[in-house]
Image: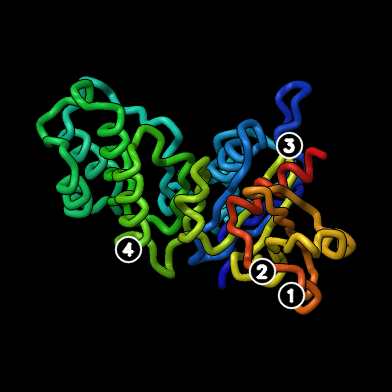
């Protein structure tokens, strides 16, 4: 695989606030990467650095380009959906399609219209007449119709109800993603995307606390629903996280061989959302 994004010692301050602190990571081609963190963790700042939208210390390279100095060249291969869709209220839907077709050589009009055909959006409607969810859908249709090598999504489904969120991710996976494209996304709805992700980056207070492929998570972490009579034996193996579910202790272990845990209770691989919560609470302790 080819490295698409390479960040080295990436740092950013806003006055006394440290948004990113010596962050380093690589993102490979053909991957769907979840950049996951709480509000204020630094994930949006990282996206801005990748897109050349903010100054920073350290270095970022995207397709071998410096996003700050070579942004025009970079954006020929990158599409970005921000957490708030901003389109002129006076613009008609068909005019928006015409505009993007005119300014971006890789825009595919038929793809945009196909996406919109599954919505209630009429092409002669003005943006100001659309609901918030419809504006989001239009924004997504315009972006997904661009044949980009890197798609950056910052909370892309805000304003959409559950049905449209599911439709969006189905479209993203089935009609957009392939082994030549790379997707980097942030979302608060981790449960909805964890089955799509190939890799995760957990960020907390400006630091990367987990950088892993989803496959490696299954090899590194084990969740045990501990039997009542095995509680002390399980704690003796030093779980890094413990909680109660319906009165039954559940523990997460890192780098413990399954054979050492098999007699303690039911074993499973933790979901990404569960692992994220455990990591965040462990970091805060």
Quarter-wise, where is residue 222 in the image?
A: bottom right
Query: Residue drawn at (70%, 55%), measured in percent from left and top?
Result: 250
Label 4 vs 1, first from the N-terminus:
4
Label 2 vs 3, first from the N-terminus:
3
In the rendered view, would you say 132 is above or below 260?
above
Left/right of residue 246 with respect to residue 106 in the rendered view:
right
Tell me whether the residue at label 1 lies in contact with that at label 2, contact meaning CB atoms closer than 8 angstroms: yes
- How far across and how far down the image is residue 184, in percent? 51, 52
The residue that mark 4 highlights is 174
Mark 2: give few (<14), some (14-19) or many (20+) Cα within 10 Å: some
The residue that mark 1 highlights is 262
Left/right of residue 242 with respect to residue 87 in the rendered view:
right
Q: Residue 267 carries which label?
A: 2
Q: Distance between the residues labelled 1 and 3?
A: 35 Å
Q: How far apart are marks 4 and 2 (CA)?
A: 32 Å
Check the image and name the residue furthest to the right: 236
Label 1 vs 2, first from the N-terminus:
1
């Amino acid at each position: 695989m080819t490295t698409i994004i390479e960040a080295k010692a990436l740092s950013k301050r806003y006055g006394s606030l440290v948004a990113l602190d010596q962050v380093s990571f690589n993102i490979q081609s053909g991957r769907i990467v979840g950049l996951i963190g709480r509000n204020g963790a630094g994930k949006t700042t990282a996206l801005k650095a990748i897109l050349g939208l903010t100054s920073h210390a350290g270095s970022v390279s995207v397709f071998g380009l410096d996003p700050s100095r070579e942004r025009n060249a970079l954006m020929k291969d990158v599409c970005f959906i921000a957490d708030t869709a901003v389109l002129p209220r006076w613009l008609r839907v068909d005019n928006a399609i015409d505009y993007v077709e005119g300014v971006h050589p890789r825009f595919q009009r038929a793809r945009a219209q196909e996406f919109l055909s599954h919505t209630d959006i009429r092409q002669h409607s003005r943006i100001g007449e659309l609901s918030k969810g419809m504006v989001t859908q239009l924004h997504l249709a315009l972006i997904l119709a661009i044949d980009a090598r890197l798609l950056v999504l910052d909370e892309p489904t805000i304003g959409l109800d559950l049905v449209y969120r599911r439709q969006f991710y189905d479209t993203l996976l089935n009609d957009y993603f392939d082994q030549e494209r790379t997707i980097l996304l942030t979302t608060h709805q981790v449960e909805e995307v964890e089955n799509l992700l190939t890799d995760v980056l957990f960020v907390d207070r400006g630091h990367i606390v987990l950088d892993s492929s989803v496959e490696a998570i299954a090899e590194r972490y084990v969740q045990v629903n501990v039997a009542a009579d095995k509680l002390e034996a399980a704690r003796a193996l030093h779980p890094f996280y413990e909680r109660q579910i319906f009165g039954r202790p559940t523990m997460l272990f890192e780098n413990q061989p399954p054979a050492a845990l098999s007699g303690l209770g039911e074993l499973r691989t933790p979901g990404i959302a569960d692992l994220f919560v455990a990591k965040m609470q462990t970091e805060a302790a």
